[in-house]
Image (cartoon, coloured by chain):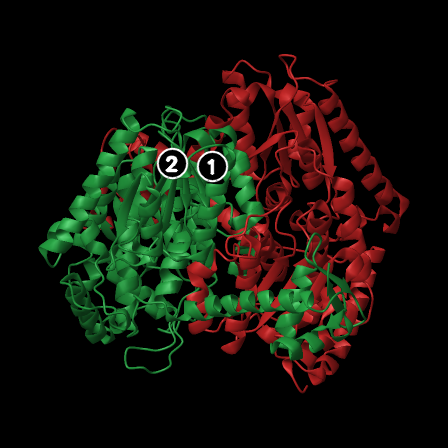
Chain colours: A green, B red
Amino acid sequence: MSSQWERFDRYYLRYPDLHFSLDISQVDFDENYLEGMNSRVERAFEAMQQLEKGAIANPDEKRMVGDYWLRAPELAPNSQVRGEVEDTNEAIYEFVRTIDSGELKTQNGSLFTNVLLIGIGGSALGPQFVADALSTKGDRMRVYYLDNTDPEGIDRVFEKIGDGLATTLTVAISKSGGTKETRNGMLEAAARYKAAKLNFAKHAVAVTGHRSELDRHAESEGWLARFPMFDWVGGRTSVMSAVGLLPMALQGLNTEQFLARAAAMDEKTRVTDALSNAAMLLALMWYKIGDGRGLKDMVILPYKDRLVLFGKYLQQLVMESLGKEFDLEGKAVHQGIAVYGNKGSTDQHAYVQQLRDGVNNFFVTFIQVDVGRQGPSIEVEPGITSNDYLHGFLRGTRSALHEKGCQSITISIDRVTPFSVGALIALYERAVGYYASLVNINAYHQPGVEAGKKAAAKLLELQARLVKELGSRNGKAATAGELAKAVQGDTEDIFHVLTYLSAPRGKVVRHSGDRPSEDTFVLE
Amino acid sequence: MSSQWERFDRYYLRYPDLHFSLDISQVDFDENYLEGMNSRVERAFEAMQQLEKGAIANPDEKRMVGDYWLRAPELAPNSQVRGEVEDTNEAIYEFVRTIDSGELKTQNGSLFTNVLLIGIGGSALGPQFVADALSTKGDRMRVYYLDNTDPEGIDRVFEKIGDGLATTLTVAISKSGGTKETRNGMLEAAARYKAAKLNFAKHAVAVTGHRSELDRHAESEGWLARFPMFDWVGGRTSVMSAVGLLPMALQGLNTEQFLARAAAMDEKTRVTDALSNAAMLLALMWYKIGDGRGLKDMVILPYKDRLVLFGKYLQQLVMESLGKEFDLEGKAVHQGIAVYGNKGSTDQHAYVQQLRDGVNNFFVTFIQVDVGRQGPSIEVEPGITSNDYLHGFLRGTRSALHEKGCQSITISIDRVTPFSVGALIALYERAVGYYASLVNINAYHQPGVEAGKKAAAKLLELQARLVKELGSRNGKAATAGELAKAVQGDTEDIFHVLTYLSAPRGKVVRHSGDRPSEDTFVLE
């Protein structure tokens, strides 16, 4: 390559019909690299074709992976799957129609005005990103979220909803139907409705796996509706299932455009010519930059406030999909790519100092949005608008980083719309799938998340045993060490539980010694 | 150490009077490490003492660094600095009193009900974090932010404010007074007030350096008030100056408690015994974990919704302070620590999969908050509350990571209050200062941020030249390459500017060829 311009000219990929472009010219790769990757690339294309045809792509869990069928049900491997998607979408639109039209009213006979989405991880990040990216003042409903088991956080949300609770439709989302944070959120919500003399069931909808704990609970209580999550859709790629479509439709956002453009991006990124396949190019660049071992963090910098949650969305999609201990042959590989980033130019003022001068353990993905705003703009200087500055800062930062040997990728879209958001999500879903093939891992399971949940459950059991033990001691104080013997538990765990229980307004009183081993505890 | 419990017992540090503890027992260090660091630790303590006495700690910019004086003006190196702090705080409280009491009313004679804070980076992240952490339904004012130069983002904020603009007090914050994003935000805001037939100056306050561009602008327009930013306070540590105190006080938050507990944490972390100094212990652990080279990312996981922005706040504080090219001797070192993280247990469902199984390039800082909520809690299972789960998930995840050799630090506080938030900020400010000494860099400048701004300015100049050139061509289209010769600019830059200008409703029309070099552009 004789110049950077020629390099750019050669590798700049655009899909004019999707108002999309991808610029990989500031990644340090060459033709030799691409040639050397040929066999891996072919394998990745084959694996994806198998997956889209309905192969068991998630062997641990013995299930198909078919996120792509959500936006193109005609490609589903059988009529049952196709029917599931089409029937569910139809049921969603019909339900939302009855809500919008007032056929289905609140207990007090009003129209619903709010949605309270209860979910966490894959059941919240997608809907949150989409709602924040696309909300307008014309939204039919305002959406609130319970995405944690923090009681104060829950209280704050209900404070914000206030008297609006009577016209709030709660949507509880959990694929397994047993996620504790979501279960707790649901119980807390039910208690709030009850306290307001409202029948929770008449304001509640479930999105969950068929016959899950949540599904059965909702059925037995007679909730307004239940929508299925399919076992062939992973939580982190569920935004185009009922998980994302129901809240979007309730909010009044255009789900058809969202799905259509995702399907269009799928088509573009199915082609087996790597250089014209944006998803494969992304995967190849990630591989090159991080040496196929995740050596560099992925910094996501959309220069657009509406896309501020995209980095958080990708944090889950990328890290949960790619952060794996073993490859497909069972060899320990400890893969993954760390992801962070909020928005430009704001983040420039937070950490571009480190990106430019500091430890070079990252690459930036710039996301440019061409159109500044709907209406006319004032000039902030003669002939210059606020958006000209936004564009200038993106380009300026890209150059300043390049000058220091920092690699970057630049994506551009025209506007933040259901179209472009659908396309971006589809692009990254497929890029993650391709990358997983390039490094030979399973992108579709998450075996590492159970250990923490089990350890948490054990701690809660220990808490119960400790409360019982302290109760039996008739006011006699004991150290963590003494209690460890009595309840047969780990001393440090016991100390932490007792410390937690002795917080203000807790059940336990602590008398502190100089060191934890000298602290004594007694039931209040 | 014979057991993990004994190790915990030995290294667990608590400040009972501050309701604070620090647990470093799950970091892989030993006594030999601490001994080996002795001379560096001593040097760090000395450097901090010099800094607090008023040494020129930022030699590039030839200024003192005295964030600590903001919460203990009696420690300022001279009476002028002390007076500046005390007078400014008094002026803030007096101003807020006149607002609260209605002595100072809006143009229409109403009480002010909203604050619109215009700032970016150090002039926004602190206020945003504090406001989000501490807001209650009893807040005196609602706070909105313009923290970018994205026109659509700006429009969205004004949509949310709606008719409330008439009772909105705009606070424009910029230390240099020349930050373009903030200048643009101010001009956009002024245009909005004007369109609503409101006198912007009668709704505007400036926080900026003495005699800055913003200061002079505010003076000439007769804004309601101007508060100084001191040259000895860096943007990223300015939250205890007028930058943070004015919005806090307007919101009705307790600034005295905020400052007092920060000062108390300063006292605790001034002691030169490393093992009882939480800030030095943090710095030492960061050093050990990342080998003094930032090899591991810092994942911040507060298990509390109110602290969700703490990771973003620390992202700036840590990365802008520590991400440096040269050490104090001028040797290229490329230091820094990457920071990300939102909140637990939510983030568990996003990326604990990678943390536990994937690339081991991180350490977690857990932040525990003991008290769950203000009022009583429902039981989500017999004897178990939502907050018990929150605590269980924190402990469970800590254990699950430890089991896989992932290191973590755990901080606990009692509640999220002005007290504890002040203490956390003070703790990290000092830890960052100590760490900078341990790795021998200047934590107080940011030489790397100018290049991107200059490149952006150059691009805007190029844009003006291009528009002029296209105008002179009488409708004759040209390629980027042809225009590069005509305006003497970089071909790729020109292509990007023209592409940007040819977005829908832009000034330029593009006729696309197969490759960028074949595209032609013409003025519309």
The residue shown at (63%, 14%) is B107
Q: Residues within 10 Å of mark 1 (few under 14, many from 20)?
A: some
| First reached walking from the N terminus: tag 1 or tag 2 | 1
Residue B424 lies left or right of residue B342; in this view the side is: right
Give the vertical position of A159 relative to A29 (above or below).
above
Q: Which mark is residue A193?
A: 1
Q: Are marks 1 and 2 on the same chain?
A: yes
Residue A246 lies in what quarter of the image? top left
Give the vertical position of A419 relative to B315 (above or below).
above
Residue A107 lies in what quarter of the image? top left
The residue shown at (54%, 75%) is B402
From the viewer's side, name the closer residue of B419 and B246. B419
* Residue A359 shows up from this direction: no
Quarter of the image where the C terminus of chain B is located: top left
**Spot occupied by residue B243 in the image (x, y as percentages of width and height):** 68, 40
From the viewer's side, name the closer residue of B503 and B267. B267
Q: Which mark is residue A203?
A: 2
**Spot occupied by residue A133 in the image (x, y as percentages of width and height):** 38, 40
Q: Secondary structure at mark 1?
A: helix
Chain that bears disc 2: A
Q: Residues within 10 Å of mark 2 (few under 14, many from 20)?
A: many
Q: Amino acid at mark 1?
A: Tyr
Chain that bears disc 1: A
